[in-house]
Image: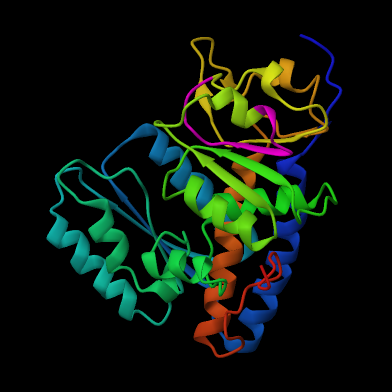
Amino acid sequence: MTTSHAQILDGKALAARMRQDIGREAALLTQTHGRKPGLAVILVGADPASQVYVAAKQKGCDSAGIASFSTELASDTSQQHLLGLISELNQNPKVDGILVQLPLPDHIDSETIIEAIDPGKDVDGFHPYNLGRLAARQPLLRSCTPYGCMKLIAETGIDLHGKECVIVGASNIVGRPMGLELLLAGATITITHKFTRNLQAHVERADIVVAAAGKQGLIQGEWIKPGAIVIDVGIHRLDNGTLTGDVDFDAASQRASWITPVPGGVGPMTITMLLANTIQAFKTHVGETDMGNTEVGNTDV
């Protein structure tokens, strides 16, 4: 393995610091209002990766003093049954956030399910209402992975105004809201996707690269502009059991100024921002805030 020149953006360490703050705030809110912030997690089917993610989210809730309500449904659960459960949780005053673990079985339409969640309880930040608020420069509950990426980028101390940012991948979960987050922060953004021509040329001019295509090793190290910041959202398990991302880490770290590792980079931040969103939703439900969650951003852009 080559020696890294880039500084490591340690998501695990940042998440640990943030979770201490979240835990303290949750304890104060619980003392003040007589109940813990509540997160309902729904898992449909027995996908092993989803089970691991759900367990990690429940563990995060427990450590932060957030009540976790878990429901596991069989893989043949009907869409109508799932919609009925979401309706009940929307009305439950002890539930501040609702998370439906994706992906769902093929017979259930994910978009219909996401839109059924009360936007004020959409702690994943996937609901079109919350994405639209972000696009309109009035963010409320923000998509967890992009929001976590913004927290990591903030750790570098870089001023994002005018920086060239290239996002590789245009999903509703990461790529598109990531572009909106960076635009809100004053950056110039390019979102690349499967129809993009000459991806290498786009990456080579980027001050910040966010790799979220879900394709192992797609971003080659020699493409990275010297001094660039590299945020790798991808995660892939190799045959030997180790994890890797969308970026050739060893080669890219020879050119980047900052880079996220896989694992230990973006992943811990995603769950941390889920917990932060749950606290934010709780505060709104008890009337402590208007949910104007704009500490990362520039509404003048």
Where is residue 131? Give x, y as percent: 45, 64
Whether residue 261 is situated above or below residue 10 in the rendered picture: above
Is residue 214 shown in magenta?
Answer: yes
Residue 174 is at least partly visible in this image:
no
Question: Looking at the image, which is closer to me, 63 or 178?
Answer: 178
Question: Looking at the image, which is closer to me, 125 or 40?
Answer: 125
Q: Residue at x 46, y 74 (%)?
A: 96
Whether residue 275 is situated above or below residue 59 in the rendered picture: below
Q: Which residues are magenta?
A: 204-216
Label tally: 0
Q: How is the image coloured?
A: rainbow
Q: Residue furthest bottom?
A: 287
Residue 136 is at least partly visible in this image:
yes
Whether residue 194 is situated above or below residue 71 in the rendered picture: above
Q: Residue at x 74, y 48 (%)?
A: 163
Where is residue 238? Give x, y as percent: 51, 15
Where is residue 194? Give x, y as percent: 40, 31
Q: Residue at x 59, y 71 (%)?
A: 279
Where is residue 237? Give x, y as percent: 50, 21
Is residue 233 shown in magenta?
Answer: no
In this rendering, position of residue 68 left or right of residue 101: right
The secondary structure making up most of the magenta span is loop
Q: Quadrant of the N terminus?
A: top right
Residue 259: image quadrant is: top right
